[in-house]
Amino acid sequence: MSDWESVIGLEIHAQLATVSKIFSGASTAFGADPNTQACAVDLGMPGVLPVLNREAVSMAIRFGVAIDAQIDRHSVFARKNYFYPDLPKGYQISQFELPIVGKGHISVSPGEGEHKEIGITRAHLEEDAGKSIHDQFPEQSGIDLNRAGTPLLEIVSEPDMRSAKEAVAYARKIHSLVRYLEICDGNMQEGSFRCDANVSVRRKGEQELGTRAELKNINSFRFLERAINFEIERQVDLIEDGGRVVQETRLYDAERDETRSMRSKEEANDYRYFPDPDLLPVTVSDEDIAQIRAGLPELPEQKKQRYIDELKLSDYNAELLTGNRDTALFFEATLAESPELSAQLVNWILGDLAGALNKAGLEISDSPIKPAMLTQLVARIADNTISGKIAKEVFDAMWQGEGSADDVIEARGLKQITDSGAIETLIDEVIAANPEQVEQFRAGKEKVLGFFVGQVMKQSQGKANPGQVNAILRDKLK
Amino acid sequence: MTLKSEDIRNIAHLARLHIDEDAIDDYVDDLSNILSLVDQMNQIDSSSVAPLSNPLDATQRLRADEVTETNQRDKFQQIAPDVADGFYRVPKVIE
Amino acid sequence: MTRSVIEICAGLATGEFSSVEITQDYLARIALHNPALNCFISVTGELALEQARQADAVRAAGNAGALTGVPIAHKDLFCTDGVRTSCGSRILDNFIAPYDATVIEQFNQGGTVMLGKTNMDEFAMGSSNENSYYGSVANPWNLKHVPGGSSGGSAAAVAAGLAPAATGTDTGGSIRQPAAFCGVTGIKPTYGRVSRYGMIAFASSLDQGGPFARSAEDCALLLQTMAKFDPRDSTSSEQAVPDYSAGLGQGIEGLKIGLPKEYFADGLDSRIAGVIETAIDELRKLGAEIKEISLPNTGLSIPTYYVVAMAECSSNLSRFDGVRFGHRCEKPVDLEDLYKRSRGEGFGAEVKRRILIGTYALSAGYYDAYYLKAQQLRRMIKDDFQSAFDSVDLILGPTTPEVAFEIGAKTDDPVSMYLQDIYTISLNLAGLPGMSLPVGFVDGLPVGMQLIGNYFDEAGLLAAAHSYQQVSDWHLQTPGLTS
């Protein structure tokens, strides 16, 4: 394996978050009854014509500006001709020679402290196809054209990635970016964000690219990593056994964790692209671009730098927090009231909260612990109401829905004991009950102090302030 | 430009058109004649001319992003050859 | 029954007859003559009478517009909600359109009465109307001859008095050539002037709808209803529409008219040339200044046109796949069989030829040689016209090189059929407006003269044609149909 290098490029299809379709006034809402959101234009009825959605164009430009790409002042829609039942007109309206977004680039971070620049070849607008349903009828496939005509931005990368890990980092970065830009909801389960991977392998040091396979049907980042790794191994094994990789489309099968050849689409396609005569060239002015640029939200890179500069976060933590727009939004919401607690908040968000979310399979936007709740919890540690250890208990209770930090502290009586009189009483009891250990300590066995702290904390059910306990104990044991 | 019967079969497949085997020769003749007519275009050098795909020098108008269509499935599916449960149906597609 | 639209409007306004009465007259005439002429694919009698009753009610309420209650026939390529729209094809024989084309909507809003849907070459591909699934149409001047195409049914219906006016579409001459063959007046507006929404596409960058009628004056009225910006058609023009009827009287005194020498060269029937020259003399008498011009790339317009039109049609016709509407073959064994047989059975020979050539011209390795080349020549052809219009106001010539030929005369030779379009197709490539009006006869068959205008100068064309029709009576001639 170590003699081999893999070369990976991704084609990402991001459904643009318009309310109507790219060429018609039908709704793009997900999950409607079959064919109830397919209007005459989407159905390719005889005589109908497409008219371009302004918002789709604007969203594409927003993306282009964010990746520092050249925006073509003059772009053209073309027809990609092929027959398939979910493609009503027998052609897909796409862009071929003159896409709206030209060359750009994006920086990704595949691991702690690592950075890599990935080139983006182009991004073009096109219409989505419908869906074929194969399990509804015994002998037939059912066609639902609700999705037909949904605007897509196809983002094509350069073959700049060298491992599945890098590919996933890039895909996550694009995913995060389109969500920051609010041009795509990023829902991979519903197919709003789809990744196809072009994978080839070559011996290290070789300049020429190997024959590539195109992997489709990947609907999560985890599967993207697995599919690419499976495919790299398959290709290397094949070549080492004297075989040859053939250029083909392969479907990823998540259940079997393998890729397999898609025979039905094997025939060489001749798409006969030509400019769509029903649509005219799209022109974009410098003013349009300037206006869109001015309206861009703070992008992940800018946010990350701000976290590093202003909040003094580490590069790694800043990257983790800004990698997902919702995480950053959550963090900023917790920060609003207590900016001085940023370091602790970061630890809670990236530590306990991330762990709990991961375990429950939840997105941060669905977290049962809301930003204000976390802020309160951290504030209670800071003002010595509770100890860090008790805080974990409070966190778990909040997760279970027992209310805010104050609610939990109150209801469970978790307030820290800071009254030195009360603590002294506890300590006196413990000293009295353990004369043997007292002797040991006085004989110079410092370690025994820990035993006493433990006993006192136990007696106080964890509520005694550990610092105070320590100081008073030392005093009394002398 | 002369076509061969194999060319006709290939194009007919691309265009998803059934053509009777015994009609292929006629298509070869007709299409070759049409292509000879078309080849007259080569009389002239146009290499420096910008292609024109639409007669008017206009640019694309953009529409507002608004939902203007309502559900008309029943009306549209009344004229469909085979529908069930709201789906259009075709012979099983194997992927 | 050779009333003009203007006369019908007057009769309806004065109460000489009601819309229901005149509609009944036309329906009776259709019943009598359509069996021999085959102008109509569908006659919508009940709907027509219903619309006529409504029109009469609107008029009685004092809300009549210019065309309220006027009967009209529509080419069977404009989608009509609830009415079969076949496009002359078996593949749409069962197609009840679920919506109205913009043009139909505009006529309905104007209160016109639809008599029926007229016969046409399948998907508007043809110059003789012989490529219709519903059979050829007979030329009312001589039933053995073709009416021209593709809007043959519309032209023949107006010529035979089965409708006072009709809509058509023109992709390479499909309004002007049948207008010439049938001795009626027809205008193809500037590309983008009339909405293409709901007009079943043949070649999207060339198609344009327009009217047929008995005179330029009638055409002005009809075009007023058709020409309008349509937000549903991205190629529709936002340019303001002038009042065509008001502009008719502007005369042609001092007008510079160019005669392209290429339009009077070899291939033109000398008797047609003679008829056209006589008409030119009339125009000279009316004060027009006539001069020779050149459109050097005229000869290349035929190959250029056929590449563009066939490439676009090969893609436009992919939607007819037997899945959502139209003909589906019996018991398809798999998807490929469904596609191939549905389309193979549904399309006629000429449509198949054009789909095949278009597919070939766009396929890998041939795109540059055919499609790209044609687009370059298309610009050269457009440039020819633009430089011509630097020195003239209008261009004039014959509409066709021959008069209507016999049914069957050219069916075995597609190429000779294509050559019929030599004078008409370059306008579609350039997107210019043109019209044909009757100027005489050869062998008892009408001769059409073509006028070509600059972009959006439909008013100028109509005014020039009207001036000529004020001093001639060719447009008033009617064929002697039995009974």
Image (tube, helix red, strand yellow):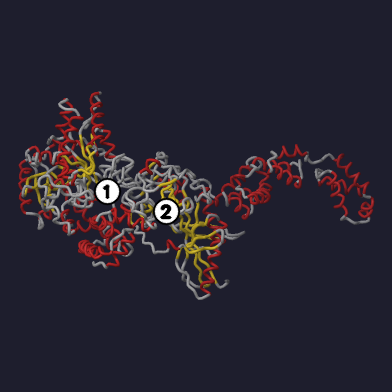
**Mark count:** 2
Q: Residue furthest front?
A: C331
Q: Secondary structure at mark 2?
A: strand
- Residue type at the position of mark 1: Leu
- Where, by quadrant of the figure, is residue C270 drawn? bottom left
- Where, by quadrant of the figure, is residue A51 drawn? top left
Q: Position of residue A421 (x, y in %)?
A: 87, 39
Viewer-side residue, C366 vs B79? B79
For residue B22, the mark is none
Q: Secondary structure at mark 1?
A: loop
Q: Which residue is mark 1?
A: B56
Q: Residues within 10 Å of mark 1 (few under 14, many from 20)?
A: some
Residue drawn where x is 9% and y is 38% of the image: C483
Q: Position of residue A263 (x, y in %)?
A: 45, 63
Q: Position of residue A462 (x, y in %)?
A: 80, 45
Q: Residue furthest bottom?
A: A242
State whether residue C347 is above or below residue C140: below
Would residue A235 be seen by someone viewing this image from the given angle? yes
- Residue type at the position of mark 2: His
For residue A124, the mark is 2
Viewed as shown, does residue C346 lie left or right of A381? left
Viewer-side residue, C26 vs A251? C26
Viewed as shown, does residue B10 lie left or right of C301? right
Q: Chain of mark 2?
A: A
Q: Position of residue C184 (x, y in %)?
A: 13, 42
